[in-house]
Amino acid sequence: MKTSVYIRDKINKLPKGYIFTYTDFSTEVNDKEAVIKHLNRMVAAGNINKLSKGKYYKPEETVFGTLQPNQYQVVKDLLEDEGKIIGYLTGYSIYNSLGLTTQVSNRIQIGKNEIRPAFKRERFKISFIKQKNTITRENVPLLQILDAIRYIKKIPDTTINKSCIRISSLLSDLKNYEKQRLIKLTAKYPPSTRALVGALLDRIGYSDDILNTLFETLNPISTYKLNVSKEILPNAENWNIK
C-alpha cells in the first residue's frame, strides 16, 4: 500500500479532535520523512490541522467555526506514558468540569511529581503543579479535589463561600473509602489544605477516627485565613480557620 493511501486511511479512522504525530504511523511506514511530508501536505490542503510542531489533528467543524481539541488531547503526551499515568489535569483545567466556575480557561495546569517550566502550545499556556503523592488512575479525582481546596482562593469568577458549598457537595458524593483515602492523601498537602478538608468533611457530617487523626496533624496555635461565612462553615474555628 502506498504511504499516502495508508496515512489517509488511518487518519480517516481517527476521531475528530484526536491528536497524533508521525510516530503513530511508524510501525507500518518506515520512511519518517515521507510521513511528515505527506502530513504537511494534508495540512496545506486543509484536510487536517497542525496544533504545534509535529502534532496534528482532524478538525471538527461547527456552525461556530473549527473546534480546538479538548485539553486532555492537547497535553496527553504529558499525562500518559505507554499507558501509565504520569500526570493529570488540575487547577484551571478542571474548575469548570467540577462545577466551581463557569469560566473555561485557555490555561492548562497539570499535576506531576516532576515539574518543568511553563510553555505554550498553540493558544494554550501549559504550567505545572508539584504533586508529592503517587499519581494513579484511582487517585486522580481525589487529587483534583484536593488541589481545588488548596488553591480555593484562586478559583476564578466565584467566591470562597460558593466554592465551599460546591466542594462540600463533591465530598458528599464520595464513598466512605474514598473519603478515607482523600484524608490520607492530605498528609502531603499544606496544613491550610488539611484544615479546610477537615472542616468541610466535618460540615457534611462525616465522622471517623481518621478525621480525628487529621485534626491532630495541625499545629494548635496556627490559624488559616479564609474569610468564609459562619453560615457556610460554622465549624471553621474548630479547625483554626478564620
Image (tube, grey):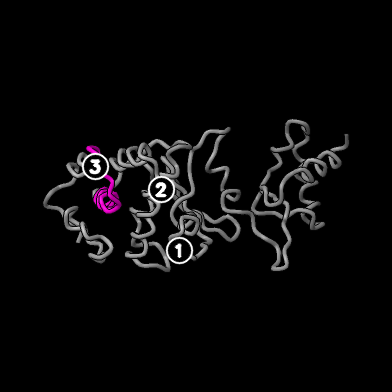
| 73 relative to 105 in the view: left or right | right
Amino acid carrying mark 1 in the image = Thr
Image-based side of 205 in relation to 155, left or right = left
- Residue type (three-letter) at the residue carrying disc 2: Asp
Image: magenta residue range:
192-211
**Tag 3: residue type?**
Leu
Inter-mark Cα distance, 1 to 3: 28 Å
> Circle 3 sits on which residue?
211
The x and y percentages for residue 179 are 34, 42
- Identify the residue shown where x is 40% and y is 67%: 158
Disc on res. 101: 1
Give me the disc on residue 173.
2
Q: Position of residue 44 (x, y in %)?
A: 79, 57
- Say which quadrant the N terminus sits in: top right
- Of the two numbered discs 2 and 3 on the same chain, state the one appearing first in sequence: 2
Return the residue nearer the eye: 96 or 84: 96
- Observer able to see residue 168: yes
Q: Is residue 194 magenta?
A: yes
